[in-house]
């Protein structure tokens, strides 16, 4: 995997070039040909997909990513989704656990932010 040192998120071979060439970064020297980039990623064995939560479960922290020490674990039945705030936990409950009373106390864990997509993934 690649890691953006500015955003501190993981990137795949599929997302890396677009990410570093985005307007947010505007890294001009990163504007290499797609073919050359793909060849470098292949040589380095960079994954094209993010690891699954199952692959990440129980591993040590990944270098380059921030560690959030006050993350909340859902804990409803088999759900073990992790969120960084009470408000995102409430949104999760409203979407995935309608009708289940919202807990007042959650397990607090250390977590890392995997990606920076529309639905941020913590593990």
Image (cartoon, helix red, strand yellow):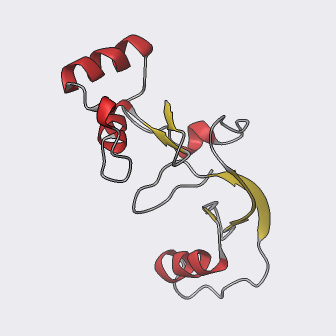
Write down the quadrant of residue 72 in the picture: bottom right
Across and down, in percent, residue 104 comes to 76, 85
Write down the quadrant of residue 100 in the picture: bottom right
Image label count: 0
Query: Which residue is found at the position 58% from the left and 42% from the top?
Result: 54
Across and down, in percent, residue 35 comes to 20, 20
- In the rendered structure, the answer to whether residue 112 lies left or right of residue 14 reads right
> Looking at the image, is 76 positioned above or below residue 47?
below
Query: Which residue is found at the position 79% from the left and 64% from the top?
Result: 108
Across and down, in percent, residue 9 comes to 52, 45
Write down the quadrant of residue 13 in the picture: top left
* Front residue of this view, candidates 122 and 11: 11
Question: Given the current orientation, which residue lies at the most extreme front position?
Answer: 28
- In the rendered structure, the answer to whether residue 18 lies left or right of residue 10 reads left
Query: Which residue is found at the position 61% from the left and 40% from the top?
Result: 56
* Front residue of this view, candidates 37 and 88: 37
> Looking at the image, is 41 positioned above or below residue 73?
above
Query: Which residue is found at the position 56% from the left and 46% from the top?
Result: 8
> Looking at the image, is 92 positioned above or below residue 40?
below
- In the rendered structure, the answer to whether residue 95 lies left or right of residue 72 reads left
Across and down, in percent, residue 26 comes to 33, 45
> Looking at the image, is 111 positioned above or below residue 3?
below
């Amino acid at each position: 995997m690649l890691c953006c040192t500015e955003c501190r998120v993981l990137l795949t071979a599929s997302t890396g070039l677009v990410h570093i060439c985005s307007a947010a970064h505007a890294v001009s020297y990163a504007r290499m040909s797609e073919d050359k980039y793909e060849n470098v990623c292949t040589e380095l064995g960079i994954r094209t997909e993010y690891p699954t939560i199952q692959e990440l479960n129980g591993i040590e922290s990944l270098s380059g990513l921030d560690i959030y020490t006050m993350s909340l674990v859902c804990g409803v039945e088999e759900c073990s989704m992790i969120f960084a705030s009470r408000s995102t936990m409430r949104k999760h409950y409203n979407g995935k656990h309608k009708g289940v009373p919202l807990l007042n106390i959650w397990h607090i864990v250390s977590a890392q932010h995997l990606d920076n997509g529309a639905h941020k993934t913590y593990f």
